[in-house]
Amino acid sequence: MFTAQNVMGEGLATELGGEFIDSIHKDMLALVDQFGLSLIDDQAESEKGLIGDGFRFNGRFFSEEEVVEAFRPAARRIKRDLREAGYINFRDSSPAGRRLDRHGFLWADFFVLRGYNAHGQGA
């Protein structure tokens, strides 16, 4: 996989490399045949060294396990907030439910809770 910067437009990242195709994706597999492309079985013994699922935040790679572990404090907080909020709908809610509804939460905020700075480094 290679990510090129600014090729398709200023500030855009463009993937210029291999892509995964599900084994049941008939249209993509037909294109592979049509253009005479080769496939790599990512489950083959020769591919065991591949990096599995992961995520990038601010240029740093995090494994799935690291993301799950970093999210645990936020998940506990969300669970507590939901329990305190009780039943919420557009007509009726508790004071805790209204506070929760007004709370802005970015998905990656949990990294701030863990002390990561803008460069993905722990504090």
Image (spheres, rainbow, N blue to C red):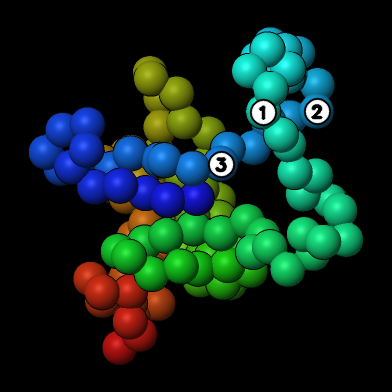
Dot placed on the residue nearer the N-terminal end, 2 or 1: 2
Q: Secondary structure at mark 1?
A: loop
Q: Quadrant of residue 21?
A: top right
Q: Residue at x 53, y 65 (%)?
A: 67
**Can you say which quadrant of the picture contains the C terminus?**
bottom left
Tell me the kind of residue under disc 1. Leu
The residue indicated by pointer 2 is: 23
Looking at the image, tell me whether mark 3 or mark 1 is earlier in sequence order.
Answer: 3
Kindly tell me whether residue 45 is visible in this rendering: yes
**Residue situated in front as seen by the camera: 115 or 85:** 115
- Tag 2 secondary structure: loop
Q: Residue at x 82, y 61 (%)?
A: 46
Amino acid type, residue under disc 3 in the picture: Gly
Structural crowding at the residue carrying mark 1, measured as other residues with C-alpha within 10 Å and reported as few (<14), some (14–19) or many (≥20): few
Mark 3 surroundings: few (<14), some (14-19) or many (≥20) residues within 10 A: few
Nearest the camera: 81 or 32? 32
59 above or below 94? below
Name the residue furthest right.
45
Give the spatial CA distance, label 3 vs label 1.
11 Å
- Numbered mark located on residue 37 in the image: 1
Q: Answer few, some or many: residues within 10 Å of disc 2's Cα (few below 14, many 20 plus, some between 14 and 19).
A: few
* Quarter assignment of residue 59: bottom left
Q: Residue at x 73, y 17 (%)?
A: 33
Q: Secondary structure at mark 3?
A: loop
Marks 3 and 1: which is nearer the front?
Answer: 1
- Answer whether labels 3 and 2 touch (C-beta < 8 Å): no
Residue at the extreme left: 10
Q: Is residue 113 visible?
A: no
